[in-house]
Image (cartoon, rainbow, N blue to C red):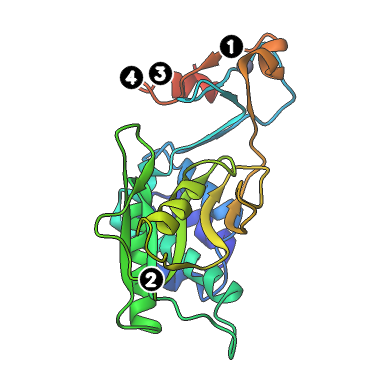
């Protein structure tokens, strides 16, 4: 299908009937991804489109930072049909970036962290098992008591080549970095497995194209979304109010979209 046909498909409510076959091996465009995430069933995408002003609200994130965008991957990826669709998009980027004839690395495992990236990582590992390596494993990086993804039960064999993937990246120091560090330290004082570069990120809402340790990141979909400390937030300075996007009955979400 063409981009126009896919957008029509989404608009007419047939989003759950999209499949990887509909894209004929071309990449899904940013407009298509955004249309799927914005579909009213998910309400998973919001971005402040205009210069800061008092009339329009902006987002207060869980971290306490303020932002001009909000993307709720969980609300889309929790549906197996959509998770498969987006895992396939990651696969295409992995193939273009890594699976170059004569130079493709051996991929033994895909590691992804709790929670939304777990099912995504599993789907990518499943696609790769069918196409490249029947013995590829999926490794879950669990959250520790502070909520950071640092725990890999049982470690990973040091001879294993591990691909890192994440559903969302906001900064180079966040969960993508922590997932990578978890793999590198999962055997304690014993030799670590090899972590392949780049790490793959489905939704990149960041200015960073490397992680804080200097390793490379490959986005699938990039958005120019910024975060601000409240006292430095240009939206607050313009008189805009910051509200939590996803609380309660959806009132805040509709307010962000200017619907009420
Ligand atoms: Zn603000």
Q: Secondary structure at mark 2?
A: loop
Badge nearest the viewer, 3 or 4: 4
Q: Secondary structure at mark 1?
A: loop
- Residue at 53%, 62% (x, y): give it: 5
Residue that carries the numbered disc 2 in the rendered image: 158
Q: Are the residues flagged by discs 1 and 2 in contact, CB closer than 8 Å?
A: no
Residue that carries the numbered disc 1 in the rendered image: 241
Badge nearest the viewer, 3 or 1: 1
Question: In the displayed structure, would residue 80 be above or below residue 127?
Answer: above
- Residue at 36%, 55% (x, y): give it: 188
Q: Are the residues flagged by discs 3 and 1 in contact, CB closer than 8 Å?
A: no
Residue that carries the numbered disc 4 in the rendered image: 248
The residue sitting at the left extreme is 154
Q: Secondary structure at mark 3?
A: helix
Among the two numbered marks 1 and 4 on one chain, the one whose residue lies closer to the N terminus: 1
- Residue at 33%, 45% (x, y): give it: 115
Q: Is residue 14 visible?
A: no
Q: Are the residues flagged by discs 3 and 4 in contact, CB closer than 8 Å?
A: yes
Q: Secondary structure at mark 4?
A: loop
Give x and y (percent) for residue 9.
Answer: 45, 56
Mark 3 near ligand 1 (CB under 8 Å)? no
Q: CA distance from mark 1 to mark 4?
A: 18 Å
Residue that carries the numbered disc 3 in the rendered image: 251
Tell me if mark 2 has few (under 14), some (14-19) or many (20+) residues whose alpha carbon lies within 10 angstroms of its own. Answer: some
């Amino acid at each position: 299908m063409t981009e126009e046909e896919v957008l029509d498909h989404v608009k007419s409510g047939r989003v759950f009937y999209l499949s990887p076959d509909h894209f004929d091996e071309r990449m899904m465009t940013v407009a298509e991804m955004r249309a799927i995430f914005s579909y009213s069933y998910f309400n998973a995408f919001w971005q402040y489109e205009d210069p800061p002003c008092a009339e329009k609200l902006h987002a207060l994130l869980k971290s306490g930072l303020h932002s001009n965008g909000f993307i709720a991957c969980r609300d889309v990826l929790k549906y197996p049909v959509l998770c498969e669709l987006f895992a396939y998009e990651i696969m295409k980027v992995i193939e273009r970036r890594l699976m170059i004839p004569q130079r493709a690395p051996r991929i033994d495992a895909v590691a992804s962290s709790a929670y939304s990236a777990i099912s995504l990582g599993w789907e990518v590992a499943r696609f790769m098992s069918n196409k490249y390596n029947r013995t590829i494993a999926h490794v879950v990086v669990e959250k520790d008591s502070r909520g950071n993804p640092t725990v890999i039960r049982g470690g990973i064999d040091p001879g294993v080549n591990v691909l890192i993937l994440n559903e969302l990246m906001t900064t180079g120091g966040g969960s993508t970095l922590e997932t990578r560090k978890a793999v590198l330290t999962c055997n304690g004082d014993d030799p670590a497995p090899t972590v392949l570069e780049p790490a793959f990120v489905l939704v990149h809402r960041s200015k960073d194209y490397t992680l804080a340790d200097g390793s490379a990141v490959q986005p699938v979909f990039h958005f120019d979304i910024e975060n601000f400390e409240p006292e430095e937030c240009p939206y607050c300075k313009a008189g805009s109010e910051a509200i939590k996007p996803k609380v309660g009955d959806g009132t805040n979400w509709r307010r962000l979209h200017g619907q009420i």
